[in-house]
Image (cartoon, coloured by chain):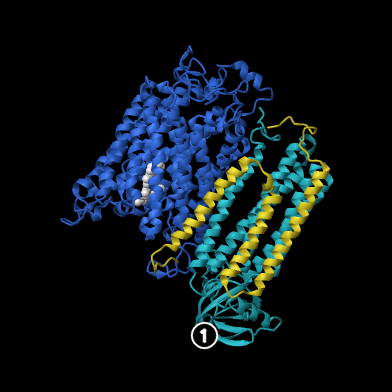
Chain colours: A cyan, B blue, C yellow
Amino acid sequence: MEIPFTSKPRPDTGIYNSKVGIWLFLASEVMLFGALFSAYILLRVGAPEGTWVHGLLNIPIGTFNTAVLITSSVTVVLGWASLQVGNFGRYKFYQAITILCALAFLGIKSYEYREKFLHHEVWLNHKIKVKHGHQEVETDRIIGHLEYEGHHQYFWNTKRLKGTPEEKDKDGKVIKAAVPPVESFKMIPDAFHYTMTPKELAHARKESAGVAHEEIEIKASDVKRLSAFVPSHSTYFAIYFTLTGLHGLHVLGGAIVIFYIWGPGAKMWKTDPQRYMNRVEVSGLFWHFVDLVWIFLFPVIYLL
Amino acid sequence: MQATTHTESHKGAHDAHHHHHEPGFLQKYVFSTDHKIIGIQYGLTALAFLFFGFLLMLCMRWSIAEGANAAQIKDYVIRPIPLVGGLLEKLLGDVAPKGIMSADLYNSFGAMHGTIMVFLAIVPLAFGAFGNYVVPLQIGAPDMAFPRVNMASYQFYFIGGVIMFVSFFIPGGAAQAGWTSYSPLATTIPTHGQAFWLVGMVFLISSSLLGAVNFIATIIQLRAPGMTWMRLPFFVWAQFVTGFLLLLAFPPLEAAGVMQLMDNVFGTSFFLPTGLAVGGRLADVSGGGSPLLWQHLFWFLGHPEVYVLILPGMGVVAEIIANNTRKSLWGYKSLVYSVLAIGFISFIVWAHHMYLTGMGTKISAFFQTTTMIISIPSVIILTCLFISLWGGSIRFNTPMLFALAFLPMFGIGGLTGLPLGFAAADLHLHDTYYVIAHFHYVVAPGTIFALMGGIYYWFPKMTGRFMSEFWGKVHFVGSFIFMNVVFQPMFIQGMAGMIRRMADGGLNYSTFKNPGAVGGLGADVMNMHKIILIGAVCLGLCQIPFIINLFWSIKNGKKATSDNPWGSTTLEWQTPTPPPHGNFDKEPIVVRGPYDYSLPGKDKDFTPQNQA
Amino acid sequence: MSDHSHSTEAHKHSPQEVSKHVKIYIGVFLALLVGTVVTVGLNAVHFDSIKLTVAIALFVAVIKASLVACYFMHLISEKKMIYVILGFTAFFFVGLMFITLSAYADLPANTVTH
Ligand code: HEM
Ligand SMILES: [Cu+2]
């Protein structure tokens, strides 16, 4: 049995099957990201004064990653164009760049994630003095790196300060050692905070660049809340991680498909070139969509 | 199911087709890419879930009826569930002490009853099973456009079902926050059941999305030569619109599901407000989220979803009515345009489920208006189907009886929706048994009747044999009576103020416990619970002949003497029985519309679409 | 699922046509890079009005997205069926965003939503 129009277009619609398929799929993706963007807007517009996080992402890295993704998009179309003139070698070359770009994008994104997991915010019970730019201010909220027992720590939160008791299984064997409570830890504070306006924040960031920060000793009993820059920190980081994480999964999925067509699936170029070109085109459409989502994600999450 | 008559009819055609090696059992029935096998897989799985969801409901009805019975017993004693109570205690532990259903268990069963019925039973049966089996045949296609995607879609559905099922047995039990899973309730109930629910939903949604892409692409691309849009059987149109509803309405719920999963697993606050207190203590969350957002995203799916539940049923009924009145459908074009209109408008009515959230008057006026507008195409469809009966010499076989019963039942369901669509009336009716009765009239005696009719109607194509007419009629009459016994009293209870989701059936709000209380639920309203319980049990008993009939007839039913035993015009009957892999012996060329019955000057009273 | 098209039937564009397309692709690529720089650059300026900042950022993003959609995804010259599908999607997308947002905007005064 043969399914018609897998490679040649159907005369009356003028398209082949998988092209209809991918556009339908992209339509559903539009709705998926549309819902997430709506959520973003609502959470942001509804956020009380001074609670919306901004200005904490690494803009140069984000910009670079944008360029990486744009490059991968153009190599996809260039690869497809090469196939159209029958130049398989050049197609291989361009798509290799695409795949490398995808990996680079994911690598850079993971690095950014790691940076965030290292960063913390403490909400204190009383105000202390810290530097914002060159100015000294009183505040009960500090962001920065957290140091404990000589190491920078990841993923700390209020619960961690209390420690956890030992866990034993039924026979009394210890399966998880006790984590002793924390009495105090050090913060290496950033000289700015997201409660500032974007302008002030950028200014403070510039002023403090290259200046060594003093560590602040913080007693656990003074801490109202402690959180790393993880999804539960705030609705901003929640939507940031959800959107970029979902987008990252799309990058990964797209890269795997493109790789499959490029490598193990390339035999089809010999047996059914038209269908092979269709596959390249369809996977490319998905890839451009992923790029397109990022084009909105980048300004919305990094800049605004 | 398919193998049984394979060898008997059209052996030649079949053999000619299988020039390659015979696939093994696993490949043929479990990992099949044939749309018909996948359709049957969907059908059997969905029927199993339908039955399971029904059993959950029977346990709940017992618990509710005990609320009324307890008033007659000293100290309001609640008795264990007969037959299954002990089993529940053994399987689930503390939540069913001594076989008595706890309120927590009631909540789990309630949430899972809704979820299972909607996402694991009706949608897979209506869209997955009937859509898969019938649509490619009716448009004259050899299979779906993407057979392997089709298989994946069933597998995702199956995995989703397993995850949902397993969640009953984890500590804390299955999800308890209703099939609507409103936040913050869904996040604060201390069970991982909700996380299972969400992961299960992500699988089910992915399955539906793959299915929808496949159906729409198939209908656009694989119509046989001559099968123009206006020659499509109405059933195909209904499935086409259903596909679009699933495709575009489900993703927002998937997004919402991911966000709620983040809330549950990673402690985010997408749907958790600032200052949320749980059990009297401030919750350890950042806050800043919006509970209303969940409701918007849920109902953005939720309302189109109810049309996903009903449109395929309407399609089935249209096919059966045309066939058994031996007449063309009245107003085919109106039907098509109405179903398209429903598709469009169903996306902009969703917040009529949210009047009580304190929404603004302008928006509520907007949603009232769109809700009233969407009832117009529904009424047009129903009217066309009614008028189609006019002057027909109707054959009252089992499929037709179910189709005929669908019309008034859906009518009741739809018309009782109108008061709910007005904010003023809905303030009183919202969250009462009136709403339960409304949508059950649409889905239970509505959609389920349509689908039952469909099973009896297409069974001869799938197996080459008829299901028993006698037992079919027993099944029909019993179901018809007891469906109404179950759901009719709920309208009255609801208007009397009985709210839904109460494990004790409202005992604590009743005049049993509070004699003379103004506005308390009276004895007559409470005692309807007992009637409903009896009705529900009898309804269950009436399904026994159906189940036996279904399986017994595969081998022993009356043989269909031709490939087209009902004398039908549509293409699925122009194939060998059962259709082989690849369906048609030779590609059909369509030359006429779908319902050319009783054309003057023809010797037969039906003229198939591919015959001049 | 195989199909019997041969390489001779394969639908290929003439080399001249393709090289014209390639020029367009490169042009779009450069435009996208410029767009990115513009967005980031303007953001560093910090206008006093937040509305203006948002409007400019989204404006540039829409232009970039249209370039990708029109040229990389060939939407500038697609078949009617694809436009129909995307037309539906656009309608529902706008419905979802716009109506949900209006529902929030229309909440009675002093409603706490978060
Ligand atoms: C034809 C016109 C219809 C109208 C005007 C209508 C109106 C409504 C309204 C306003 C509600 C919300 C009631 C409340 O919660 O207070 C509702 C609930 C519901 N309707 Fe309909 N409806 C219609 C048709 C349907 C159809 C075709 C179905 C298909 C199955 C359906 C299924 C449901 C369901 C499942 C609910 C309950 C949701 C819940 O759990 O809260 N309705 N209907
Ligand atoms: Cu609704």
Between residues B524 and B389, which one lies in front from this camera angle?
B389
Q: Position of residue B103 (x, y in %)?
A: 34, 53
Say which of C106 and A258 sits in front: C106
Q: Residue at x 62, y 43 (%)?
A: C82
In the image, is residue B46 above or below residue A207? Answer: above
Q: Say if residue B402 shows up in the picture.
A: no
Report which quarter residue B35 is drawn in. top right
Residue A88 position by quadrant: top right
Image position, residue B512 (x, y; %): 19, 52
Left or right: where C72 falls relative to A184: right
The secondary structure type at the circle numbered 1 is: strand
Q: Amino acid at mark 1?
A: Lys
Rendered image quadrant of residue A154: bottom right
Q: Name the residue located 64 percent from the left edge and 87 percent from the top edge.
A: A134
Q: Residues within 10 Å of mark 1 (few under 14, many from 20)?
A: few
Q: Please state, as top left, top right, bottom left or bottom right, where the C terminus of chain B lies in the image.
A: top right
Above or below, A176 against B399 in this view is below
User: Which chain does tag 1 point to?
Assistant: A
Q: How many marks?
A: 1
Residue B273 at x, y = what percent?
A: 44, 66
Q: Is residue B464 left or right of residue C14?
A: left
